[in-house]
Image (cartoon, grey):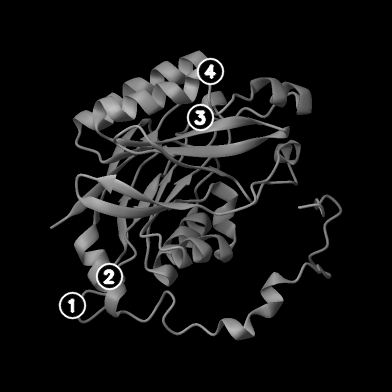
Amino acid sequence: MAVFTVALLQLLPGATEAENREKGLLWCRKAGAMGADLALFPEMWSCGYDLSGGAGAIARRAIPRDGGFLRAFQAEAAALDMAIAVTFLERWDGPPRNSVALFDRHGRELFTYAKVHTCDFGDERHLTPGDRFCTAELDTRQGPVRVGAMICYDREFPESARLLMLQGAEIILVPNACPMESNRLSQLRARAFENMTAIATANYPAGKPDCNGHSTAFDGIAYDEAAPVSRDTLVVEAGENEGIYLAPIPLDKLRSYRSREVHGNAYRHPRLYGPLTEERVEAPFIRPDRRKEY
């Protein structure tokens, strides 16, 4: 049975970009030694999700896509024969972006995804939102796997995972930086259930302000042909401590399930969904800090 193993790197960040680079590389090596096919970092690892100090300070922490930080993880992916999804505050033409770069086990950059649903009610108002959702075919030791990504608050919008499913995603990677309580975990469980996709989330551990660990993975397989009742799709849920938590995703079972079950794209009626793309916002959902340009 083909099993794709995601290493959820639930790590405390250092004080500098250099510290996060060296610690991140070390823990990628640990994940590789544990047999992981992909290592996933929590949100904005390059700066430890530090958005303090206002727009100017945030912009100074941003790093380029072609700089030494990302190139180090690109080289490490090839050296370890393991994919790496590394997160960073991306220098941009304008305010920075909250991004994740996916390198395959050959060191090729498959995509860089920038968070679409930035938290504009907080410090993320100083960032530039992304403008698309990405998937790519990842070459792995288990064969090709279609992988997509969304980041933290993207989870709150069903459209994020739905668009990734429509692009063929079998596994959705979710870098995260917030308290993972029952409602947010339920969102991830629901996104996996309704799209028949695996969803792997890496969060910061307790000790990082406003974070509490509980990195998770759900395999999206709600029903087993051999069982009369539904099953728990949870593969792993970490505690609050720092560590590597392995999430084995049973690809053969997932693909078989996707080929026969009723969720996903089989019975949708898109011709009726026009209001979902309307820009109008009405009471009680009007918020004065909403950035209308996005």
Q: Residues within 10 Å of mark 3 (few under 14, many from 20)?
A: many
How far is disc 3 from disc 4 in space, using C-alphas?
8 Å
Residue annotated with mark 2: 231
Quarter of the image for residue 59 reads top right
Q: Amino acid at mark 1?
A: Ala
Q: Secondary structure at mark 3?
A: helix
What is the x, y in percent for residue 160?
55, 60
Q: Amino acid at mark 3?
A: Trp
Residue annotated with mark 3: 45
Marked residue nearer the N-terminal end (2 or 3): 3
Marked residue nearer the N-terminal end (3 or 1): 3
What is the x, y in percent for residue 212?
48, 39
The answer to whether the residues at label 1 and label 2 have Cβ atoms under 8 Å apart is yes
The answer to whether the residues at label 3 and label 4 have Cβ atoms under 8 Å apart is no
Q: Nearer the viewer, mark 2 or mark 4?
A: 4
Q: Secondary structure at mark 4?
A: helix
